[in-house]
Image (cartoon, rainbow, N blue to C red):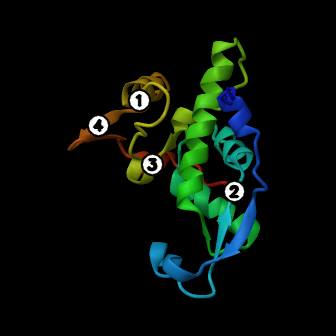
């Protein structure tokens, strides 16, 4: 039987990433792309590194992380799928480390979905992210079925 990888092991498994690939076939037209555009696929540690740089009182979105990755690699866009997956891996790896008593963990709850929306896929779901953000002084509001940080735009960290 194969032992399942821990979240920290998944975070440290680069899978030959990052890399930049041409956008072709069915990807043309997705995410506003055209023929000749390129897609930067980050490594899990690259996404984690960006998330770690968000200081107290600030927030970041997955789309901002994608823009940072695209710019870093000279690509048209950063991959929305892998960036989201790797943010989740980073969050679970942080919780794994916290449970082992480590203090220097990624403060993943400062990473939001587009529009300031909380991420239900993070450890503990929406309730945990809400609690952690409120502990830092952010006000969480409900918009339909989603929860978001009130006035999140004024807290965005874009100084990379």
On screen, 44 above or below 98?
Answer: below
Q: Which residue is mark 1?
A: 125
Estimate the x, y position of residue 66 in percent, counting from the top left. 59, 59
Residue 142 in sight from this viewpoint: yes
- Numbered mark located on residue 113 in the image: 3
Can you say whether 56 is above or below 158 in the image?
above
Crowdedness near tag 1: few (<14), some (14–19) or many (≥20) residues, C-alpha within 10 Å: few
Distance between the Cα atoms at labels 2 and 3?
Answer: 17 Å
Sequence-wise first label, 1 or 3: 3
Residue at horizontal 38 percent and vertical 45 percent from the top: 117
Q: Which residue is mark 2?
A: 42
Q: Earlier in the sequence, mark 1 or mark 4?
A: 1
Disc 1 vs disc 4: which is toward the camera?
A: 1
The furthest residue to the top: 101
Residue positioned 62% across, 82% down in the render: 37
Tell me the number on the disc at residue 72: none
10 Å crowding of disc 2: few (<14), some (14-19), many (20+): many
């Amino acid at each position: 039987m194969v032992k399942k990888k821990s979240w920290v092991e998944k975070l440290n498994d680069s899978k030959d990433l990052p890399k930049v690939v041409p956008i072709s076939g069915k990807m043309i037209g997705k995410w506003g792309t055209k023929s000749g555009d390129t897609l930067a696929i980050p490594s899990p540690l690259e996404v984690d590194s960006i998330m770690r740089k968000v200081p107290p009182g600030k927030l970041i979105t997955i789309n901002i992380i994608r823009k940072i990755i695209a710019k870093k690699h000279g690509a048209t866009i950063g991959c929305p799928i892998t960036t989201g997956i790797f943010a989740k891996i980073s969050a679970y790896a942080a919780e794994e480390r916290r449970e082992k008593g480590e203090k220097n963990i990624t403060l993943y709850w400062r990473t939001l979905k587009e529009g300031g929306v909380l991420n239900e896929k993070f450890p503990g779901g929406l309730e945990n992210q809400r609690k952690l953000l409120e502990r830092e002084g952010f006000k969480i509001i409900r918009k339909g079925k989603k929860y978001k940080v009130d006035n999140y735009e004024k807290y965005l960290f874009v100084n990379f």
